[in-house]
Image (cartoon, rainbow, N blue to C red):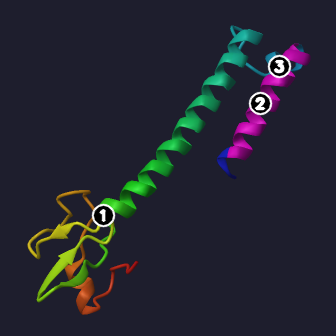
Amino acid sequence: MKITDIMIWLERVRVKAGIATDTVILELDGDWKKEDLEQACEAACDILYDYSLLAEQLAKMTEKYGMPAPPVKRKDHESISWRCPECQKAVNHRNRHCPWCGKALGWDCLKGERGCRKK
């Protein structure tokens, strides 16, 4: 079940609690009130929304900092330089990450080894 589906069901529970409080409240502990159930559903929706934002952010950070991409080889006049595949700034072959933007550099990717993603 997707997070959006869970949020929809929680919203339905919250709405139902406002319409027919006796049927929903009877299934819960006797100390619960309609307002408690509404607050619990709102808090659950907030948590799920925050979780989905964090999961999205984690995926982007993993792509940038954890998934190596091969540096780009550039010929400038008579010399050869290596550039970050993300920000295109100069990098050194000793760098595991770009010192400018933090992108993971996969020098092994240039040799065609497994586990590297080419852009």
| For residue 30, above or below residue 48 | above
Decide which of tag 1 and tag 3 comes sooner along the chain: 3
In front here: 101 or 36? 101
Residue 87 % position (x, y): 30, 64
Q: Residue at x 77, y 30 (%)?
A: 11
Q: Establish if 80 lies above or below 11.
A: below
In the structure shown, which secondary structural element does the residue marked by tag 3 occupy? helix
Please identify, in this view, whether the residue under mark 2 or under mark 3 is nearer the observer.
Answer: 2
* Distance of label 2 from label 3 (alpha carbons): 10 Å
Task: Report x, y in % for residue 5.
Answer: 74, 46
Q: Secondary structure at mark 2?
A: helix
Per the image, the residue denoted by label 2 is 11
> In which image quadrant can residue 9 be found?
top right
SS for tag 1?
loop
Name above or below for residue 28 compared with residue 115: above
31 lies above or below 90? above
Which image quadrant is residue 25 in? top right
Q: Nearer the viewer, residue 74 or 95?
A: 74
Q: Is residue 15 magenta?
A: yes
Viewer-proximal residue among 91 and 111 = 91
Which picture quadrant has residue 79?
Answer: bottom left
- Quickly name the residue at label 3: 17
Q: CA distance from mark 2 to mark 1?
A: 43 Å
Left/right placement of residue 92 relative to residue 37 reads left
Location of mark 1 (residue): 87
**Most prominent secondary structure in the magenta stretch?**
helix
- Answer whether residue 18 is magenta in the image: yes
In the rendered structure, which segment of residues is drawn in magenta? 4-21
Mark 2 or mark 1: whose residue is earlier in sequence: 2
Q: Amino acid at mark 3?
A: Ala
